[in-house]
Image (cartoon, helix red, strand yellow):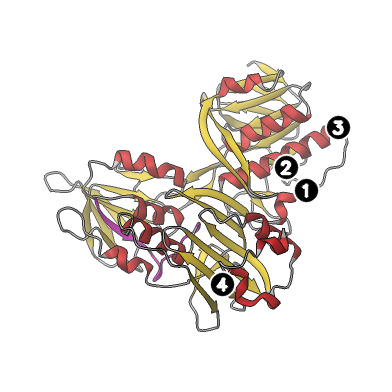
Amino acid sequence: MSTIKTRYLVIGGGIAGVTCVETLAILHPEEKLVIITASSLVKNVSNVSFYAKTVVKFDVKDTEASSLLKIHPNLKIVYDSVKYLDTKNKIAVTDDNVSIQYDVVCICTGGIPRLISDSNKFNRILGIRDTDSVKDFQEKLKDGRRMVIVGNGGIASEIVHATRGIQKVWVIRDDYISATFVDPGAAEFFQDTFRNKSEDNKDTTILKRHIFSEEDTVVSINKNLKSAALGPDWYRKLENVKNASGEQELEIIYKVEVESVEEVNGQEFALNIKLTNGRTIQCDFVISATGVEPAVNFSCDESLKRGPDGGLAVDEFQETSIKDVFAAGDVASATWQHAPHWFQLRLWTQARQMAGMAAKAMHARITNETVLQDFCFELFTHCTTLFGYRVVLLGKYNGQGLGNDYEILLRTTPRHEYIKFVLQNGRLQGAILIGETDLEEMCENLILDQIDLTPFGDDILNPDIDIDDYFD
């Protein structure tokens, strides 16, 4: 059994692990650092753009792990997986029986897709873990004729939007449509873009305010969080889309789950999907988009405290219940007291933020310095690209945790922009910005400063008033 001694140990080659390595390369390049990765390819961040202090857009790409050697002179890469963590003696043991003695360790093992039952029996049940995988699945499904989509979150919604020329059956266990990334109104904006992209009608800006009351439908967004539905009929137009053969392209089946999957030879479609309502659907593939769960795939001498979602519970410095053991990314569960406008959502953005914070705390532990939690945890932000549009989510963008006592102010220009403000007591609590709105910095300031916007009324989103001049 070979032994390696290091000051810092990072377990995992995902976005969190690589960010931790990159941050430590800046903070403490003279100290030894070991990263354990099961693959020779790791996730790399590139094309970083700042639209505001906390709003960051970046691309994530696969790159050779050896490229990390260029940024850290004392880095050693171990291509293996950890099977046992001895936190008392500070030793990590890999599958190949390599022992790594460390001073501080950060666990960045990520998450794994939460697949439907029977998924291990059939290679036609496909699991994905993020929206970046949708394009890969389009390649795999290009020869398919009918697929079943299981799940009711952002990924399932994007698959429904992104695929064409194949019959789709969307199986959800709820009686409503929910999306993690965008609300139904934004989903309708995207669908309208596809439906009318060949038309050249003059765009008209629509501005409207909606006040939520006890009678309005409040739908689940992410376990304990709440999301308000702007309109229940965005998917009805989608259901009537026809493919080239004239068959209905999308069917949505509500309040059901998959009971069993059977592979059958000699019939038109390879799989029989039996639902809990007794109906059987034949298809070529099943896409399981029911979320991810933290990947804690090693044993430990002492039990690590878990969060409500099964992740490793961490404090505001990303430290677990065991001293000198940190965790970041999808494997971690943020159990500290959150800022009013921040919540955890397992996204690339937060994996990067958590890992940067973990690296700073690890460095502070070694150097006996004091560290404060990073400012990025004051406000939830996520910036991505969907269907060619820039999408920025800020704060409680779907009214998460606000109950029913809030207002929604909308401005939308078909095929150009979609802007949604969530206000409570006249103060901005969250926003969805789709398109080149240039409102990111203004919204960030309004949410953080909690300025009373009551005097502005609906003019806060009046396209004829350059409102951001007041608040920049």
Q: Answer few, some or many: residues within 10 Å of disc 3's Cα (few below 14, many 20 plus, some between 14 and 19).
A: few
Q: Would residue 299 be visible to someone looking at this image?
A: yes
Give the Cα distance between marks 4 and 1. Answer: 32 Å
Q: Nearer the viewer, residue 30 or 460?
A: 460
Would residue 179 be counted in the magenta stretch? yes
CB-based contact (under 8 Å), mark 3 and mark 2 = no
The type of residue carrying mark 1 is Gln
Q: Nearer the viewer, residue 265 or 88?
A: 265
Rendered-image quadrant of the N terminus = top right
Would residue 127 be counted in the magenta stretch? no
**Which label's residue is closer to the chain start, 2 or 1?**
2
Q: Is mark 1 on a helix, strand or loop?
A: loop
The type of residue carrying mark 2 is Met
User: What residue occupies the far left of the structure in this picture?
Assistant: 266
Kindly identify which residue carries mark 3: 367
Kindly identify which residue carries mark 1: 373
User: What residue occupies the far top of the structure in this picture?
Assistant: 2
Image position, residue 131 (x, y; %): 45, 47
Main secondary structure along the magenta-highlighted residues:
loop
Kindly identify which residue carries mark 2: 357
CB-based contact (under 8 Å), mark 4 and mark 1 = no
Residue 240 horizontal side relative to residue 162, left or right: left
Write down the region rendered in magenta: 166-181
CB-based contact (under 8 Å), mark 2 and mark 1 = yes
Q: In this view, does 78 lie above or below 330?
A: above
The type of residue carrying mark 3 is Thr
Which one is in front in this view, the residue at disc 1 or the one at disc 3? 1
Q: Is mark 3 on a helix, strand or loop?
A: helix
Image position, residue 429 (x, y; %): 65, 67
Give the Cα distance between marks 2 and 4. Answer: 34 Å
